[in-house]
Image (cartoon, rainbow, N blue to C red):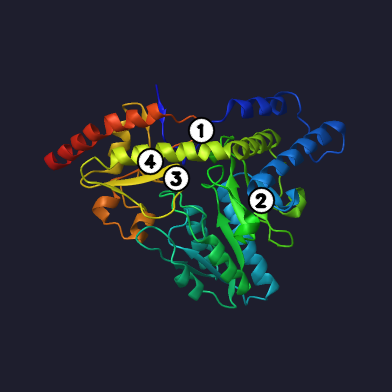
Amino acid sequence: MISYLDHNATTPIRPEVVDAMLPWLRDHYGNPNSVHSLGQRARAAVERAREQIAALLGAADASEIVLTSCGSESDALAVAGAAWQASDETKGKRRKIVTTKIEHDAIRVLTGQLRRRGFTALEAGCGAEGVVDAGELKAMLDDEAAVVSVMHANNETGVLQPVAEIAAAARAAGALVHTDAVQSLGKIKIDAKALGVDLLAVSGHKVNAPKGVGALYVRRGVRLAPLVAGHQEKNRRGGTENVASIVGFGLACELAGRELAVASPHALALRKRIEAGVLRVRGARLNGEAAQRLPNTAHFSFDGLDGHHLVVALDLEGICVSSGPACSSGASMPSHVLTAMGVPAGLATGSMRVSVGWGSTDADADRLLAVLPKAVEKLRAAAVAA
């Protein structure tokens, strides 16, 4: 029996989503860009899913949704596409990208690549609770800023960021604003219009849809230089649409929106139950404790042990958690997020992220809390002996 407490890494596909996808894998194989009946049936399914995704994001119209392969591609299209477009339109005047030290690697690595290609890329820091310093970021804005990218909720700590405040300042400076809302989707309400952003990235596998499908909200009127050439997605992203996965993503978004009022309080209750139990463990610390966080996410550090070893020890007991983001788990080194927060290296390397979601129960939480104290002490004893 597995207690899965790693929903920020990925989520199980809901049975209803699988059922909705199957006909598009077995029977309805038309290309949605074909004019015959099989193609148009697929096109109608894609457009229905686009509407479902738009509704969950608070988009004004479904045409503002660009379908992609994942959240990382959505981030790249938003930031690189906006930066290239702004540079071209201003004849090289706007070539500055402003972001933060706590972004996902999809943004951090991308901005490094753009920096090597002649763009300026600046990163604002955060406070000890993991909240971006909005004042520091605003001071980086000027008439050279092309795009500002600030994540909606941090993928490691779950800490919510002042996106609306930053967006207002960035747009006043003439820059486009992007937010990575991959971790927020389905966990809290997202309203792209209320946030004041121009671009917002999400991913299907974080909301009980399949891996390999994502979306980018692009506010009406915003122009991006495409990364993948082609006429699909209104010339914004080439490539034949992944109909089955898009259908699944659309339904998952509809279900998440319908159930949010119940799912979010349930996740918060589980999170608080887990936090109360974990903090009884000697040397445990809750990162971002005083900040507003996603209802499902708790990030801990333990003095005197290696977080990767703790994940393995819990896995042997049938409990799935992580020591950081899934894209870098396995590396026993402080995460860039905890480093930016000023968490000492000795604590930062001994981290554990617990994230609940659809299907998580009190029994899963209790199982973790029963096993964790002994696992921590055993690893500490081994570290001292070594």
Find disc 2 in the rendering and name its residue: 58
The residue positioned 80% from the left and 41% from the top of the image is: 33
What element does badge 2 sit on? loop
Tell me the kind of residue under disc 3: Cys
Disc 4: which residue: 272
Q: Which mark is residue 2?
A: none
Can the viewer see residue 31? Answer: no
Q: At numbered mark 1, what does the secondary structure look like: helix, strand or loop?
A: loop
**What distance separates the C-alpha of mark 4 from that of mark 2?**
29 Å
Give yes or no for contact between labels 3 and 4 (Cβ–Cβ under 8 Å).
no
Q: Quarter of the image holding residue 179?
A: bottom right
Name the residue carrying label 3.
Answer: 327
Amino acid carrying mark 4 in the image? Lys
Amino acid at dot 2? Gly
Q: Secondary structure at mark 4?
A: helix
* Of the two numbered discs 3 and 4 in the rendering, the one whose residue sits closer to the viewer: 4
Q: Mark 4 or 1 closer to N-term?
A: 4
Q: For label 2, count other residues whose C-alpha is less than 10 Å away and answer few (under 14), some (14-19) or many (20+).
A: some
Q: Is residue 120 left or right of residue 65?
A: left
Quick check: 132 above or below 217? below
**Residue 358: numbered disc:** 1
328 or 46: nearer the eye? 46
What percent of the width, then of the height, locates residue 108? 48, 58
The percent coordinates of residue 46 (x first, y second) are: 74, 39
Name the quarter where the C terminus is drawn: top left
- Residue 71: x and y in percent read 57, 48
Q: Is residue 220 left or right of residue 384?
A: right
